[in-house]
Image: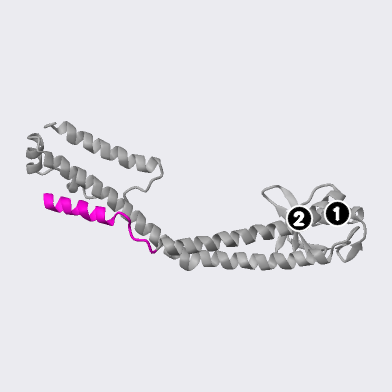
Amino acid sequence: EGTFDAYSWQLIENKQKFIGQIMTSKSPVRSCEDIDDAALTYAEVKALATGNPYIKEKMDLDIALTQLRTAYSNYLDNKRGMQSDIVKKYPEQIRRIEGNIAAYKKDIALVESTKSAEFAGMTIHGKTYDTRKDAGEALIEAVKKIGIENSGTLIGNYRGFDMQVNFDNKSGSFVINLQGDLSHKVEISNSPTGNITRLDNELNTLPVYLANNEQKLEDTQKQLETAKIEVEKPFSRIDEMRDRLSGIIIGL
């Protein structure tokens, strides 16, 4: 007390708080103040050296006001973000999910219409195969002939879905995209009957995908309504910020 030690410690404390915000992902102060704002005037040096308590009080007010300004800046950023989400993000997501839901329903109806107690049959390059084994072997041969360079080629139809062969660079394997209103990807193995089972399993899972999208639509609609409420809320600490600012002005 009555020396520069307290002032120096205050500077180190401020520095630690700023670094702490960065390291803990909290929102830091968006801009640096001019260096002169942190420099002591001759009068302040004299007051500090004589142990004037008002200097520390002013510094505390400055720190508190900086924190409040940061919180207010975050509030404005969040408000602008929510306004953008309300106008663009959520409506676009809702439209996309609604489109997916309608497409899944059409594909599910197609799957239901092609159900068979045995095997629905598969057409490859214009030839129809009536057994799972024959269809699976023909599928593997068709994929081999296409190769990586012709990825994206249509080779036939299964249960009303066009079959497009693609090479997945990530997995390093060939996949069949079952093209309905949506595209449903199935990785191809070396097992003829196993591949038919994989295709059926993917088509039989469409109701699960539909349910997931219906839940996603409900969640997104709730997020939109919540954002509309939150964006209208005022800054909760505005009165505190005004009081701090008034304290600094009065002190000056």
| Element on which disc 2 rests | helix
| Element on which disc 1 rests | helix
- Residue at (6, 38) in percent of width and height: 46
- Residue 236 visible from this viewpoint: yes
- Which x, y percent locates residue 173? 74, 49
Write down the residue under mark 2. 202
Q: Look at the image and say whether residue 55 sits in the magenta stretch.
A: no
Q: Is residue 70 above or below residue 5?
A: below
Type of amino acid at the residue the image marks with label 2 = Glu
- Residue 181 visible from this viewpoint: no
Which secondary structure type mostly characterizes the magenta part of the structure? Answer: helix
- Residue at (92, 57) in percent of width and height: 131
- Residue at (36, 43) in percent of width and height: 21
- Which x, y percent locates residue 174? 75, 52
183 relative position to 56: left or right: right
Residue 154: image tag: none
Write down the residue under mark 1. 141
Badge 2 local density, few (<14 within 10 Å), some, or many (20+)?
few
- Residue at (77, 57) in percent of width and height: 204
Badge 1 local density, few (<14 within 10 Å), some, or many (20+)?
few
Tell whether label 1 touches label 2 (CB within 8 Å). no
The N terminus, quarter of image: top left
Residues shaded magenta: 232-252
